[in-house]
Image (spheres, helix red, strand yellow):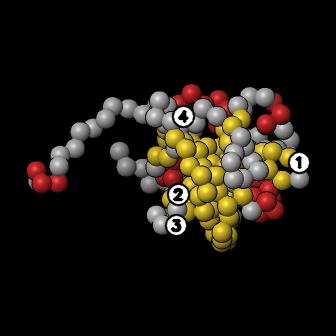
Amino acid sequence: MLVRDFDRSQEYSTTTVAMVTSSYDGIINVMAAEWTIRSSIDPFLISLYVGYERKTYEMVRASGEFGLSYSSSDQAEIVHISGNYSRRSLDKIGTGMFPLLPSNRIKAPLIAGSICNFECRVVDEFPCGDHAIFVGEVLEGYYDDSKSPLVFHGGKFYRLGDRIPKKRTSEY
Ligand SMILES: Cc1cc2nc3c(=O)[nH]c(=O)nc-3n(C[C@H](O)[C@H](O)[C@H](O)COP(=O)(O)O)c2cc1C
């Protein structure tokens, strides 16, 4: 049944969640972000939307870099922690719960066990309501096809469901 609800309607789009890593001034941080999107093929750009009040906003702004680790279905617990605690009250990386993978081109590490990871350099920043859009040029990309993505829908985590076969366009 179609429900008219301005506030909750956004929860019913389906996303996956990236863990955004940043490093500045001796601090390493991680936060969950479902609002990321590839924004250019060549150059390879990914836009990341970060609320101005997040510690991550300060750190990405100051360092000009960020890592993106797209969550696998094994990572629901750490995604939940990264998205519900701020570095202002908890040293998330210091808990030892986030397995780190060294980066090649940026200071911030990546999160090991993800389905894909990107190392990004900020090439632009735009204001967008209560979030900033950081446009990241992808310097390195990695994937692990033994992993399955974490699906985020209606505020809950799921595993990917069955594949739906599609016809070739010539069959229509
Ligand atoms: C599933 C999920 C997705 C989220 N997506 C975003 C997002 O796209 N952008 C954002 O600014 N915050 C997002 N958040 C909220 C931040 O992850 C949260 O405020 C976090 O505590 C910020 O951490 P920090 O202050 O250490 O940077 C999300 C939270 C969850 C649980």
Q: Which residue is mark 1?
A: 26
> Gap in Å between the C-alphas at discs 2 and 3?
14 Å
> Gap in Å between the C-alphas at discs 1 and 2?
28 Å
- Looking at the image, which residue sits at the far right? 25
Q: Residues within 10 Å of mark 4 (few under 14, many from 20)?
A: many
Horizontally, is 142 left or right of 54 in the view? Answer: left
Q: Which residue is mark 4?
A: 72
Horizontally, is 148 left or right of 19 in the view? Answer: left
Assess mark 3: CB under 8 A from ligand 1?
no
Q: Quadrant of residue 83?
A: top right
Q: Is residue 12 visible?
A: no
> Gap in Å between the C-alphas at discs 4 and 2?
17 Å
Q: Is residue 112 above or below residue 57?
A: above
> Gap in Å between the C-alphas at discs 3 and 1?
31 Å
Q: Which residue is mark 2?
A: 37
Disc 1 residue type?
A: Gly
